[in-house]
Amino acid sequence: SQQGEEDPQALSIQEGENATMNCSYKTSINNLQWYRQNSGRGLVHLILIRSNEREKHSGRLRVTLDTSKKSSSLLITASRAADTASYFCATDEDTGFQKLVFGTGTRLLVSP
Amino acid sequence: DTEVTQTPKHLVMGMTNKKSLKCEQHMGHRAMYWYKQKAKKPPELMFVYSYEKLSINESVPSRFSPECPNSSLLNLHLHALQPEDSALYLCASSRGQGALHSGNTIYFGEGSWLTVV
């Protein structure tokens, strides 16, 4: 089952610009994670934010979480061509099992 | 580089064939997963094994049969598949299952591309 949606579906920017992706979800969660996937490859874990956290940073990544609105955002600052990939949010539902449910994804294209 | 290894990287099989996808990890993880991903879609959970026991089956058709021979290995046996089963099959692992392990990073392999003809 699909937990939620990401917005925008696709984003095209120039190197050096910031990229913001939004994720909405539907149910109560333990945490929310962001993954990156290069075309046709496996997923790489980027960052995790727990349900009691509001903001988290990792290098050029900034993630926010608003549990009242059931939404999260991923900001990539000073983007590079190598950031071109699909980005997925994934929620870990509060069911007692660690069961990641992925959002629809945002395809990011960073042009040199 | 991922520490979850999947073989083969590509597989083409007929609808009457029997084949298997294999996954291996040596991180000491006790939870392993199979996900299916169609083109331009998010991954969808198929199966979860916890301590070598099947703990989640997301109503997957019986033509897909998972097997966990030991804590490092996870197989997906394929039989009588349909062309619509063509997809990228992703294996993943994490330290464990359950509330105590909530928030553990899940590590994904590079996937096996399956084409059913």
Image (cartoon, coloured by chain):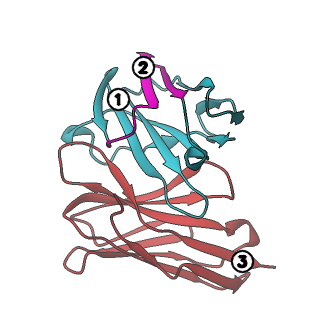
Q: Quadrant of the N terminus of chain B?
A: top right
Q: Is residue B37 left or right of residue B113?
A: left
In front: mark 1 or mark 3?
A: 1
Question: Which of B44 and A97 lies nearest the eye of the viewer?
Answer: B44
Mark 1 / mark 2, whichever is N-terminal: 1
Residue at image location 46% in from the left, 32% down from the top: B64
In front: mark 2 or mark 3?
A: 2
Residue A99, percent from left and from top:
31, 47
Number of residue marks: 3
Mark 1 secondary-structure assignment: strand
| Residue A51 against residue B87 in the figure, above or below | below
Q: Are marks 2 and 3 on the same chain?
A: no
Residue B90: quarter of image: top right
Name the kind of residue labelled 3 in the image.
Answer: Val
Chain assignment, label 1: B
Residue at image location 40% in from the left, 74% down from the top: A5
Name the kind of residue labelled 1 in the image.
Answer: Tyr
Residue at image location 37% in from the left, 33% down from the top: B95
The residue beneath circle 3 is A110
| Residue B65 against residue B115 in the figure, above or below | above
The residue beneath circle 1 is B49
Name the kind of residue labelled 2 in the image.
Answer: Cys
- The red-tinted chain is A
Residue A7, percent from left and from top:
47, 81
Magenta segment, which residues? B58-79
Chain assignment, label 3: A
- The cyan-tinted chain is B
